[in-house]
Image (cartoon, grey):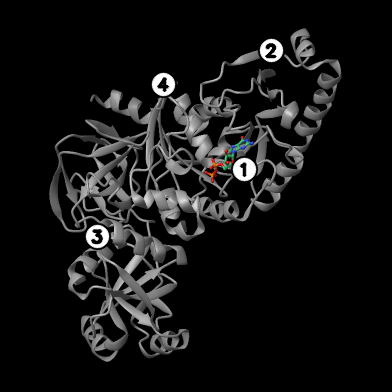
């Protein structure tokens, strides 16, 4: 690829994730986006949650049973000359770490709000994460086909609770059974709603001008007058769209519609591909890396085991930060200082795994992981830099894992190790005994691991309580002191799944006492590579 062709390719990328409270409509809107991108023929195939069509594993079956989405997948589709990369983020709070790291791999976010419910807690938490990096945010207020709350009130809530200015771009005309469409405040155009188009790309019926005879014919003079007043009020109460403010994360363009009936989504997507940022520079421990740099670099933000039972493999998801991936290229695995040849990176086009020949900054590729790749790992064309800001968090819940069949110890260890690579759970192996201690950020994780061990590794495990209150990663520059510490504190030390020394504290008091006793040893609640 020539330099200018490369720069152009990169400029076309739009890499984003969707944040929302469970049930706001994230899955539904994802389906419609893929439908609009022609990536799927029929909506309803994104996840097995409702249709069961893509239940590729028992694990997914569990997702269906629980009605939550656990997986993070990547979907790529072309739209209006742009290449859109959509990174799915799990909505359940027990998977917040996973979501956190996925949000480090996007350049912008789409926030979906249930128009009847307004701002909900999960959205507040996710917004806090976006705030850390001033991620630009698009807002879609969903479910206009229902009797929803007053829209100005909902926007007010977004402004006051989420602390971001709202710039409505479209505005709904009516709601529930009387929903007529949306009005574009910028172009003075009415997009007319036709119900029953959920699974097809709807026709775009437009009327130019709210004061036009066509508008009066469609809506009636009374509704036009009402709407005119309302729009005036809205314009007075909200902000005008400003690209710079949006890109700085200070203002969000707001769109209305109904994902279920596939209306208003296209109007949003059309602006999204225009305004959302192309790949942004990424920070490393050495220097920021611009996306247009031709030398290849990327980092791993997620690892997933056994995505497809037929393939029985583990995929490491890499965000490309600069340069081009080409099939068979050599790249350096910076942490272990080795060159590896990547012959078969994968992408996940609408849930279908296909091989990529080429991918550029902003794209996500999946590498086959045989245990050497960890979350946070950097890959380059030789430069020894490391991307920063992709942490592991110390788990808050701990259980001892016991086998039902003691002969399957190897299998259990392998399973726990591999599942821990995904980052949602962490494995700790005490220095002094043969326990296997599993740490997680949420209770649901323990069930997930138990079920996946059964399904994917054929081992039955049980959990026992263990007196671990919290874990801290241990660092010390003074080698002698560290050895001393290791001897004296051995009973509370463990090695985690990534081979890092960890202090597993039975109580908070114990942790503070130990910290006081060893002021030159660092006890860290997060671990970065
Ligand atoms: P998620 O949990 O955020 O992924 O939400 P889903 O996309 O699964 O949607 C939750 C529920 O809301 C499902 O029953 C959807 O059919 C429904 N839903 C989604 N969008 C709309 C909409 O625009 N209107 C209505 N009436 N229901 C919707």
Q: CA distance from mark 4 to mark 1?
A: 28 Å
Q: Earlier in the sequence, mark 2 or mark 1?
A: 1
Q: CA distance from mark 3 to mark 2?
A: 60 Å
Q: Earlier in the sequence, mark 1 or mark 3?
A: 1
- Residue beneath label 1, please? 113
Q: CA distance from mark 1 to mark 3?
A: 39 Å
Q: CA distance from mark 2 to mark 1?
A: 28 Å
Q: CA distance from mark 2 to mark 4?
A: 25 Å
Q: Quadrant of residue 173?
A: top right
The answer to whether mark 3 is within 8 Å of ligand 1 is: no
**Coordinates of residue 374 in the picture (x, y in percent):** 26, 57
Q: Earlier in the sequence, mark 2 or mark 4?
A: 4
Number of residues whose C-alpha sits closer than 10 Å to that of mark 3, classed few (under 14), some (14–19) or many (20 or more):
some
Residue at far front of view:
405
Q: Earlier in the sequence, mark 4 or mark 1?
A: 4
Q: Secondary structure at mark 1?
A: strand
Number of residues whose C-alpha sits closer than 10 Å to that of mark 2, classed few (under 14), some (14–19) or many (20 or more):
some
- Residue beneath label 2, please? 208
Labels 1 & 3 near each other (Cβ < 8 A): no
Work out whether 209 lies above or below 7. Answer: above
**Coordinates of residue 115 in the picture (x, y in percent):** 68, 40
- Residue beneath label 4, please? 81
The answer to whether mark 1 is within 8 Å of ligand 1 is: no
Q: Residue at x 46, y 26 (%)?
A: 35
- Residue beneath label 3, please? 457
Q: Quadrant of residue 267?
A: top right
Q: Residue at x 48, y 54 (%)?
A: 66
Q: CA distance from mark 4 to mark 3?
A: 44 Å
Number of residues whose C-alpha sits closer than 10 Å to that of mark 4, classed few (under 14), some (14–19) or many (20 or more):
few
């Amino acid at each position: 690829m020539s330099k200018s062709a490369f720069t152009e390719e990169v400029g076309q990328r739009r890499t984003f994730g969707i944040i929302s409270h469970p049930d706001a409509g994230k899955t539904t809107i994802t389906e419609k986006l893929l439908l609009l991108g022609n990536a799927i023929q029929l909506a309803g195939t994104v996840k097995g949650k409702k249709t069961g069509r893509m239940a590729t594993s028992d694990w997914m079956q569990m997702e269906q049973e629980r009605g939550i989405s656990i997986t993070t997948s990547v979907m790529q589709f072309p739209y209006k000359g742009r290449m859109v990369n959509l990174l799915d983020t799990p909505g359940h709070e027990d998977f917040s770490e996973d979501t956190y790291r996925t949000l480090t791999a996007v350049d912008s976010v789409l926030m979906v709000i249930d128009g009847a419910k307004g701002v909900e807690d999960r959205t507040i938490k996710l917004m806090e994460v976006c705030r850390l990096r001033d991620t630009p945010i698009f807002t879609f207020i969903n479910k206009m086909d229902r009797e929803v709350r007053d829209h100005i009130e909902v926007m007010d809530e977004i402004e006051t609770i989420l602390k971001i200015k709202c710039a409505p771009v479209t505005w709904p005309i009516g709601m529930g059974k009387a929903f007529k469409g949306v009005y574009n405040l910028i172009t003075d155009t009415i997009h007319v709603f036709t119900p029953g188009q959920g699974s097809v790309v709807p026709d775009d019926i437009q009327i130019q001008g709210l004061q036009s005879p066509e508008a009066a014919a469609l809506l009636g003079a009374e509704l036009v007058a009402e709407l005119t007043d309302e729009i005036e009020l809205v314009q007075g109460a909200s902000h005008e769209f400003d690209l710079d403010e949006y890109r700085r994360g200070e203002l969000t363009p707001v769109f209305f519609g109904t994902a279920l009936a596939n209306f208003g989504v296209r109007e949003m997507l059309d602006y999204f591909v225009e305004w959302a940022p192309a790949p942004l520079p990424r920070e490393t421990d050495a220097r920021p890396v611009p996306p247009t740099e031709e030398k290849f670099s990327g980092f791993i933000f997620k690892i997933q085991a056994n995505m497809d039972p037929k393939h029985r493999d583990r995929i490491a998801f890499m965000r490309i930060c600069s340069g081009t991936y080409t099939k068979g290229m050599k790249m350096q695995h910076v942490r272990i200082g080795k060159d590896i040849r990547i012959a078969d990176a994968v992408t996940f086009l609408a849930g279908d795994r296909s091989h990529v020949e080429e991918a550029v900054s902003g794209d996500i590729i999946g590498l086959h992981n045989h245990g050497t790749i960890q979350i946070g790992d950097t890959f380059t064309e030789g430069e020894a830099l490391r991307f920063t800001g992709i942490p592991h968090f110390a788990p808050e819940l701990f259980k001892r894992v016991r086998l039902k069949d003691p002969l399957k110890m190897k299998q259990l260890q392998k399973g726990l190790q591999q599942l821990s690579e995904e980052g949602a759970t962490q494995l700790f192996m005490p220095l002094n005994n043969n326990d296997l201690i599993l740490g997680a950020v949420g209770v649901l994780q323990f069930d997930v691991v138990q079920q996946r061990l059964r399904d994917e590794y054929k081992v039955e495990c049980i959990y026992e309580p263990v007196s671990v209150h919290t874990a801290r990663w241990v660092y010390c520059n003074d080698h002698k002191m560290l050895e001393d510490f290791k001897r004296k504190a051995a009973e509370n030390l463990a090695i985690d799944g990534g081979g890092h020394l960890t202090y597993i504290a039975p109580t908070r008091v114990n942790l503070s006492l130990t910290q006081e006793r060893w002021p030159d040893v660092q006890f860290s609640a997060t671990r970065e590579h």
